[in-house]
């Protein structure tokens, strides 16, 4: 069974090496809509794949990092990167280009990493990310599946290769969230007292 949760954010970037002259030479932005699709082959004690309320913590925070932020490829011109860091309090350094395709891969990668390190407390089993769809405009989106995340021909994704500005981290519920994710520390869901057995 699959469930879908929608997230939204505003983001700015330059997509280097793309065919469109406007996109590769000028900072521009989009109003993104992200569809996070989870799946499981059994339901928890609440008869759910995964309680939507649980997605309002670390996973929401990590996706919200993109909101009103500028993203750049860490291989871009050092002067451009320095300007992004100097003139924006909210920025994210990515090991891949900030295209819709890569946003879908990155969000899949982050969400799956968090789920894998989450200590479930309500009978959840084999919950995983099925797909992420990154709507960049009203007419175009990119969709990512597990095989795309692990496909190094699309760019290697390692947690340690991402960097977030201090302002982005300060706005998370836990400013140490990403450091804990890199360190492999568990995320612990709240305990649940069953009302019906």
Image (spheres, rainbow, N blue to C red):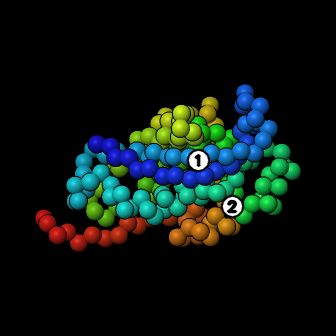
Q: Position of residue 27 (x, y in %)?
A: 75, 45
Q: Earlier in the sequence, mark 1 or mark 2?
A: 1
Residue 63 appears in the figure: yes
Q: Position of residue 40 (x, y in %)?
A: 31, 46
Q: Which residue does the numbered mark 1 point to in the structure image?
A: 31
Q: Residue at x 53, y 41 (%)?
A: 134
Q: Position of residue 47 (x, y in %)?
A: 22, 55
Eyeballing the image, is 64 above or below 166? Answer: above
Q: Which residue does the numbered mark 2 point to in the structure image?
A: 90
Query: Element type at marker 1?
Result: strand
Eyeballing the image, is 12 above or below 61? Answer: above
Q: Which numbered tag is attached to residue 142?
A: none
Residue mark closest to the camera, 1 vs 2: 1
**Quarter holding the C terminus?**
bottom left
- Residues at circles 1 and 2 in contact by the CB criterion of under 8 Å: no
Query: Element type at marker 2?
Result: loop
Q: Residue at x 61, y 33 (%)?
A: 154
Q: How many marks?
A: 2
């Amino acid at each position: 069974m699959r469930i879908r949760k929608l997230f939204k954010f505003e983001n700015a970037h330059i997509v280097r090496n793309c065919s469109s002259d406007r996109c590769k030479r000028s900072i521009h932005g989009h109003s993104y809509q992200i569809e996070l699709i989870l799946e499981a082959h059994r339901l928890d004690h609440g008869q759910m794949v995964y309680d939507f309320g649980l997605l309002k913590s670390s996973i929401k925070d990590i996706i919200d990092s993109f909101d009103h932020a500028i993203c750049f490829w860490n291989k871009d011109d050092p002067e451009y990167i320095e300007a992004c860091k100097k003139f924006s309090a909210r920025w994210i350094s990515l090991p891949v280009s900030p295209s819709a395709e890569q946003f879908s891969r990155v969000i899949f990668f982050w969400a799956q990493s968090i789920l894998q390190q989450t200590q479930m407390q309500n009978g959840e089993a084999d919950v995983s990310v099925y797909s992420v769809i990154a709507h960049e405009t009203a007419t175009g989106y990119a969709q990512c599946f597990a095989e795309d995340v692990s496909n190094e021909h699309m760019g290697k994704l390692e947690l340690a290769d991402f960097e977030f500005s201090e302002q982005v981290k300060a706005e998370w519920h836990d400013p140490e969230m990403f450091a804990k994710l890199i360190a492999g520390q568990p995320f612990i869901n709240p305990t649940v007292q069953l009302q019906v057995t």
